[in-house]
Image (cartoon, rainbow, N blue to C red):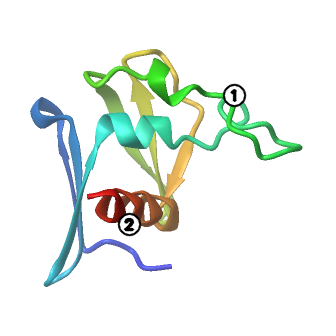
């Protein structure tokens, strides 16, 4: 697991910026992070099927509060009141790769 060298929460832009190395930076829209939540309220624990309908997450969702969890993850409290997901560095990096591949 690679830990980012720098983390910036750009609330006005609704972006999480993760600097992984001198030449690699990920800029993740809040809506994409929220849509990728893997908590038990968003993903069925037994089947792995996504319960959260990604279309139900508004593009303008805001991160009300953001905190580090240990040295391995971030926790968000979203403007839709959801706050039970943990986003490990590996998971955030996989979101970034998926976004890059979709471009």
Residue 92 placement: quadrant: bottom left
Q: Residue at x 49, y 57 (%)?
A: 73
Query: Which residue is depicted at the point 75% across and 41% down?
Result: 49
**Residue 66 seen from this side:** no
Name the outermost residue toward the front: 103
Above or below 31: residue 78: above
- Which disc number belongs to residue 97? 2
Label 1: state its secondary structure: loop
Query: Eyeballing the image, is 8 above or below 93?
Result: above
Q: Which residue is mark 1?
A: 41
Between 48 and 13, the one nearer to me in the picture: 48
**Tag of residue 51:** none
Q: Position of residue 28 (x, y in %)?
A: 28, 50
Category of crowding for the residue at label 2, using alpha-carbon neighbours closer than 10 angstroms: few (below 14), some (14–19), many (at least 20): few
Q: Residue at x 55, y 46 (%)?
A: 86
Between residues 103 and 93, which one lies in front from this camera angle?
Answer: 103
Could you tell me which secondary element the residue under label 2 belongs to?
Answer: helix
């Amino acid at each position: 697991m690679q830990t980012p060298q720098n983390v910036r929460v750009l609330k006005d832009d609704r972006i999480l910026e993760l600097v992984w190395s001198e030449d690699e930076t990920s800029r993740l829209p809040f809506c994409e992070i929220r849509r990728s939540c893997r908590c038990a309220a968003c993903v069925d624990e037994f089947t792995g099927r996504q319960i959260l309908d990604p279309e139900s997450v508004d593009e303008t969702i805001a991160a009300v509060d953001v905190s580090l969890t240990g040295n391995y993850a971030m926790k968000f409290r979203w403007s839709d009141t959801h706050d039970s997901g943990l986003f490990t560095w590996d998971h955030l990096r996989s979101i970034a790769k998926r976004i890059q591949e979709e471009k």
